[in-house]
Image (cartoon, rainbow, N blue to C red):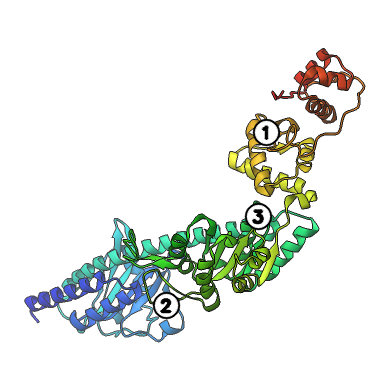
């Protein structure tokens, strides 16, 4: 073979290799095809690619033409500097062995190469002084073109390096995303785990046990209770502690949309199905495939839409708006309502068949006023949450907790959280005391029930250390001020003190006066 014929072969092979490397195939499949092209068109047999394992730093054989049986049983590795492959990587340049049998460092771990033929190994270079692995192959016979074949193999290695670098970058990003996903899952499961659910009352313990049991199965759940009792949190706890936790949790407030938009939002629509539908859109059912769909305020949907929803719940089938194609969905349904559905069924406002379809596993959330023993723990939990949001330390006095326990909480936990967030804002020193708590709709200071009349008290003795005021004394003064409508003279009479004495107490006890 003359030089021109060799160049023609190499150009044709480079064209084949470039086409292979430009295709979006997995790296292992791409390397196999490159080695086939070297064998079929480039007169380079028994090609092998070994890449550096990022975890161990060893050379791991990734692809071999004329695959060795050893690769099917266990991976073949070369430590840095070990064997001919390690020699190539150590030198950082091509190695040409005219006769393989004459090289003492040849280990023959693959039982693949012909010892009587030459062997060419070149590094796969990804940057200045950076290498991703080694490419090696054997010419079919011993000839004078070994230096030219080595340069050609270096060209192929440079082309491979781009694909290897891209694949390694994708793998790094995949690992980062996987680690981030796993971390987020652990965080979410921790936030919605049973340990993070507050309440030791009998009613709440019953709810927690129901959540533990129903989370194991795909049963439809209907969470019932007043607004602000935490129905959405129960839905999250069920999902993230179920086998469907790896799937999505999709939420929708059914009361927030009219029927036409609700149908599109839940079932999706095709392009051109209505004015403004410029693209095809998946509905919430499709988005929740393999996971859970939480339908809040389910009792507020119209009877017309109830019939459409019933079919999806019964058959697991739907059609997008503007389409006749039936789609099957695998979705667990958790619904929630604060309405009396039984009364709505009797009045003909809610379909009876849909009611029974949803009411497979009812969970009743008790109102906060029905479990006052949970208020102290719940208040501390919410204060800790607010402290994390505000990035500072917050604490709460016992007198403030007693104020909370006297309130009926018509807005339940949501109202309490809002109240505590307002109180935290008004607390400059981070201590939520009785005097900074403002409750809505209470009389006169929002305690829910008027304070009992205070009998005249004996004058308070001066404080030994005004920097550390006694909590009971501070509470007595605040209670008197509340009873007196925050008029100091009236409060002084209740306490059997002079106006000057109570003014002094207000100052040293750091009581913020209210203007009513």
Q: CA distance from mark 3 to mark 2?
A: 35 Å
Q: Is residue 21 above or below residue 437?
A: below
Kindly indicate whether the residue at mark 3 contacts the one at mark 1 (C-beta within 8 angstroms). no
Marking on residue 230: 3
Which one is nearer the viewer's eye here, 109 or 168? 168
On residue 331, the disc is: none
Residue 39, position in %: x, y? 23, 82
Question: What's the mark number on residue 326?
Answer: 2
Residue 13 found in image quarter: bottom left
Do residues under tags 3 and 2 come within 8 Å of each other at their CB atoms? no
Task: Pick the residue in front: 463 or 256.
Answer: 256
Q: Quadrant of residue 77?
A: bottom left
Q: Can you give x and y, in whole percent of width and height, for residue 375 in the image?
A: 76, 47
The residue labelled by disc 1 is 430
- Quick one: label 3 or label 2, which is nearer the N terminus? 3
Q: Nearer the viewer, residue 115 or 438?
A: 438
């Amino acid at each position: 073979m003359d030089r021109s014929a060799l160049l023609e072969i190499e150009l044709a092979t480079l064209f084949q290799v470039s086409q292979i490397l430009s295709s979006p195939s997995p790296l292992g499949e791409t390397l196999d095809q490159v080695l086939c092209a070297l064998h079929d068109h480039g007169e380079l047999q028994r090609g092998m690619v070994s890449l550096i394992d990022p975890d161990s730093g060893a050379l791991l054989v990734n692809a071999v033409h004329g695959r060795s049986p050893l690769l099917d049983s266990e991976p073949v590795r070369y430590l840095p500097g070990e064997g001919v492959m390690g020699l190539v990587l150590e030198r950082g340049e091509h190695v040409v062995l005219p006769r393989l049998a004459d090289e003492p460092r040849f280990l023959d771990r693959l039982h693949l190469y012909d010892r009587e033929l030459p062997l060419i190994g070149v590094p796969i270079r990804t940057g200045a002084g950076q290498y991703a692995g080694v490419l090696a192959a054997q010419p079919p016979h011993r000839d004078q073109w070994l230096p030219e074949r080595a340069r050609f193999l270096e060209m192929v290695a440079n082309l491979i390096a781009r694909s290897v670098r891209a694949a390694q970058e994708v793998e790094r990003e995949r690992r980062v995303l996987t680690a981030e996903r796993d971390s987020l899952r652990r965080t979410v499961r921790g936030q919605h785990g049973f340990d993070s659910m507050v309440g030791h009352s009998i009613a709440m313990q019953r709810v927690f046990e129901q959540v533990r049991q129903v989370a194991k199965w795909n049963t439809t759940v209907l969470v019932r209770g007043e607004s602000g009792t935490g129905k959405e949190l129960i839905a999250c706890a069920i999902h993230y502690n179920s086998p469907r936790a790896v799937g999505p949790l999709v939420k929708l407030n059914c009361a927030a949309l009219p029927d036409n938009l609700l149908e599109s939002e839940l079932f999706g629509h095709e392009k051109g199905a209505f004015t403004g539908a410029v693209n095809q859109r998946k509905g919430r059912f499709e988005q929740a495939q393999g996971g859970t769909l939480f339908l809040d305020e389910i009792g507020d949907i119209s009877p017309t839409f109830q019939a459409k929803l019933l079919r999806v719940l019964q058959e697991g089938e739907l059609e997008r708006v503007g389409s006749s194609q039936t789609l099957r969905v695998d979705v667990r349904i958790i619904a929630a309502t604060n309405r009396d559905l039984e009364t709505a069924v009797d009045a003909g406002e809610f379909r009876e068949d849909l009611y029974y379809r949803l009411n497979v596993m009812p969970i009743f959330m008790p109102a906060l006023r029905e479990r006052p023993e949970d208020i102290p723990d719940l208040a501390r939990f919410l204060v800790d949450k607010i402290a994390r949001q505000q990035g500072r330390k917050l604490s709460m006095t016992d007198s403030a907790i007693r104020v909370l326990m006297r309130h009926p909480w018509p807005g339940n936990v949501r109202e309490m959280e809002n109240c505590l967030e307002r109180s935290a804002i008004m607390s400059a020193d981070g201590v939520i005391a009785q005097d900074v708590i403002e409750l809505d709709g209470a009389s006169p200071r929002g305690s829910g029930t008027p304070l009992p009349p205070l009998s005249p008290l004996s004058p308070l003795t001066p404080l030994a250390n005004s920097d550390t005021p006694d909590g009971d004394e501070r509470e007595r003064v605040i209670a008197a001020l509340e009873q007196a409508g925050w008029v100091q003279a009236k409060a002084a009479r209740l306490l059997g003190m002079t106006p000057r004495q109570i003014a002094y107490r207000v100052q040293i006890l750091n009581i913020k006066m209210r203007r009513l």
